[in-house]
Image (cartoon, helix red, strand yellow):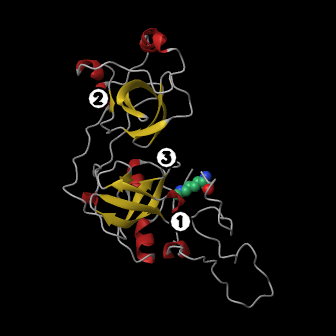
Amino acid sequence: TYQTFDWELYLKETNSVAAPIDCFKQHEVPPTNEFKMGMKLEALDPRNLTSTCIATVVGVLGPRLRLRLDGSDNKNDFWRLVDSNEIHPIGHCEKSGGMLQPPLGFRMNASSWPMFLLKTLNGAEMAPAKVFKREPKDPRSNLFEVGYKLEAIDKKNPQLICTATVGAVKDDIIHITFDGWRGAFDYWCRYDSRDIFPAGWCFKSGHPLQPPRQKSTGQNRFKSRTSNVLPVLTVSGGEPAVALVSPAGSSVPPQPATEPDTSTAN
Ligand code: MLY
């Protein structure tokens, strides 16, 4: 369960603007997810983009799929949008003259791949072509500007989509920072990345959105009945100002007053 996040209020309180929707390679109306758990499809192996493999849907979240490559382990799951160009119905690879490949780290002898493939597909529920949605058009250029707010996948916790800010723009790439978090989760991506979304996308698509992390002021956790001293915000150097605002209407669980160890916080 999660709270819906009030973007309008947050933008006002942080005196910031949302990145316009034409910045993004996303449909204005998020696609609906008609995949079912257990369905099989073809996916590019994220660890070897020259290979097309068999994948199984092991999770669904809004318009996103959690995928596991057949013959791989359960430690290398990855997420794709239902309108990704990296997933296709079974048969697509062969139609285009290719051969399905074992995933990197195939758990059996390579010689057992043909029989494994046969047994994997026999009686399997294959995702029908109609549940694969067309990829959005490319934005005409990099229209992002520093300071724009957006929703972005946390690549270290890829099930999460979080409130974020464009920290820098350089040629065709942008720097993504996560509101209220130190740099450990930042990354650079192309402006046409499928991992970034306009403000409001999660709400429209039924995907959970991680609100900005708020630092405790200490006021609530350490309140003293005798103190007349105004509470002081716990600020350490380089914290973005957004960590200090408290958007009304958003409710997040109490956070520790100390910084988490971001080297292990995944
Ligand atoms: N397990 C981590 C999750 C951090 C998520 C950071 N994102 C939102 C930028 C932790 O709780 O520390």
What crowding class fits label 2: few (fewer than 14 Cα within 10 Å), some (14-19), or many (20 or more)? few
Q: Earlier in the sequence, mark 2 or mark 1?
A: 2
Q: Which three-letter amino acid code belongs to the residue tagged 2?
A: Lys
Percent of width and height locating residue 107? 54, 20
Percent of width and height locating residue 57? 46, 30
Q: Residue furthest right?
A: 226
Identify the element where label 3 is drawn.
loop
Image position of 229 (left or right of 226): left
Q: Which three-letter amino acid code belongs to the residue tagged 1?
A: Ser
Which residue is rendered at x = 28% and y = 52% of the image?
Answer: 28
Residue to which mark 2 is pinned: 130
Q: Which three-letter amino acid code belongs to the residue tagged 3?
A: Pro
What crowding class fits label 3: few (fewer than 14 Cα within 10 Å), some (14-19), or many (20 or more)? some
Residue to which mark 1 is pinned: 250
Residue to which mark 3 is pinned: 158
Identify the element where label 1 is drawn.
loop
Which residue is rendered at x = 39% and y = 48% of the image?
Answer: 205
Which residue is rendered at x = 29% and y = 29% of the image?
Answer: 130
Q: CA distance from mark 3 to mark 2?
A: 26 Å
Q: Residue furthest left?
A: 140
Q: Quadrant of ligand 1?
A: bottom right
Identify the element where label 2 is drawn.
helix
Which residue is rendered at x = 43% and y = 26% of the image?
Answer: 55
